[in-house]
Image: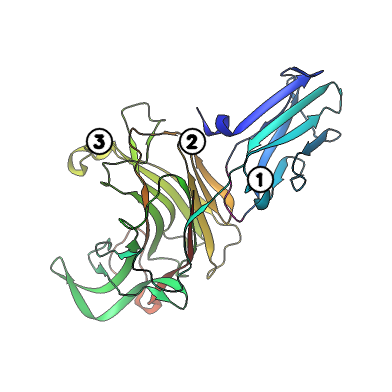
Amino acid sequence: MTDFELNVIEEGFYKGEPCDDFKIHLEKYHPGVPGYSVAYKYYIVFKGERISPRGCNIRADYPDVFFKADEIIIPDATRQMGGWMTIDLHCAEDPDYTAKLKIKLRKYEMTLEDNFETYNTDLWTPRHDGAKVAMAYTKVKDNYVRDGKLCLDFEKHDEPVIRDGKECYYSDAGLHTRGKFSQKYGCFASSIQVPPCPTGIFTAFWLLPEGRYQEDYFFKRTDTGDDFHGCSEIDIMEIFCHPATRGSAHTEHYWEPNWDRAVSGITKSSLGYDYTIPGYKDGQYIEYACVWNEYALYYYVNGVLAKVNDKIAPVDEVFPAYILYTCYIGPEGSGAFWGEVPDKDLPQAMKVDWLRVYK
């Protein structure tokens, strides 16, 4: 079973009887995200050939739905009604041919919202082990909220902190909801501003299993052709170093049971996609989201579908996900793979305006 098969029905008729000669096809299905219209590309086939919709009579059973030459636009309020929407099509060349396209509308119910007016210690726990380079440490704070935003700072300090026997003058930050909030399936969305420096930053909004990392899974990968690969990390957004234009990476990471980095490094795999954000300008807050269900994972940037992974299937025990925000620093001389940020450009901060989770 695929997500398309669960949520889309395409039917054709000739004089009221089922017939495959005339149909309206959806190019791909996706559920959409709250706050945005959902758009679907479509095409019409008549007797084996694609035809123009011009002259065809096409209408939806919801009055707010509208059509472009190759696109169906469903407003957010209509999608939020849930249930099945039906589109009727009448052939321009022969009125005895008709078709129906049925799309299941995704209705969402909010399960968590944090607008960061205060720092909620009942929800968030600071990370203390996040730094990825030897020159930095992860700074734990009592309050990460500043001016109504969650602020994860990149800083250089006058006095060092000893980490693994080394003096560290640089700090980054991170926090998570492990043990306080987790959810299996749903929509995870957040509005985030990343620092404007073109290099030396590594910011992320991601999910891990409420269990054992690399051993407990969200789903398995079905396109490898070999043994089980289980996903236990969903990176909704990662921004590394994009000096020309901002982009976001959307990735899942997979392991086999009993994976050992020292022995079985080759068994780890990833599925990633780099998405360039149209018209991006430094200082903007960008909305990143993913919708995760049994058979697919959908990534969105500002409500636009950026990536689909439908090569997945449930595992025997699907673990719920908890949420993380992290920022890592690449100080001068660190050799960080995401680049180095000059001291003159510090401090910087990854800022989060809001977090919303739906089921």
Decide which of 294, 28 is in the foreground and name it.
Answer: 294
> SS for tag 3?
loop
Q: Residue drawn 56% across and 57% down?
A: 277
Residue 359 coordinates in the image, percent (x, y): 49, 48
The residues tagged by marks 3 and 2 sit, at their Cα atoms, a distance apart of 22 Å
The range drawn in magenta is: 31-35
Nearer to me, 304 or 217: 217
283 w.r.t. 232: above or below = below
Q: Position of residue 85 (x, y in %)?
A: 68, 38
Q: Residues within 10 Å of mark 1 (few under 14, many from 20)?
A: some
Colour mode of the rendering: rainbow
Classify residue 284 by image quadrant: bottom right
Viewer can see residue 105: yes
Distance between mark 3 and mark 1 Cα atoms: 39 Å
Circle 1 sits on which residue? Answer: 39
Which is more N-terminal, label 1 or label 3? 1
Which numbered disc covers residue 310? 2
Q: Is residue 221 left or right of residue 1?
A: left
The answer to whether the residue labelled 3 contacts the one labelled 1, judged by CB atoms less than 8 Å apart, is no
Instruction: Give amino acid for label 2.
Output: Asp
Q: CA distance from mark 2 to mark 1?
A: 18 Å
Mark before the other along the chain sequence, 3 or 2: 3
The residue where tag 3 is placed is 257
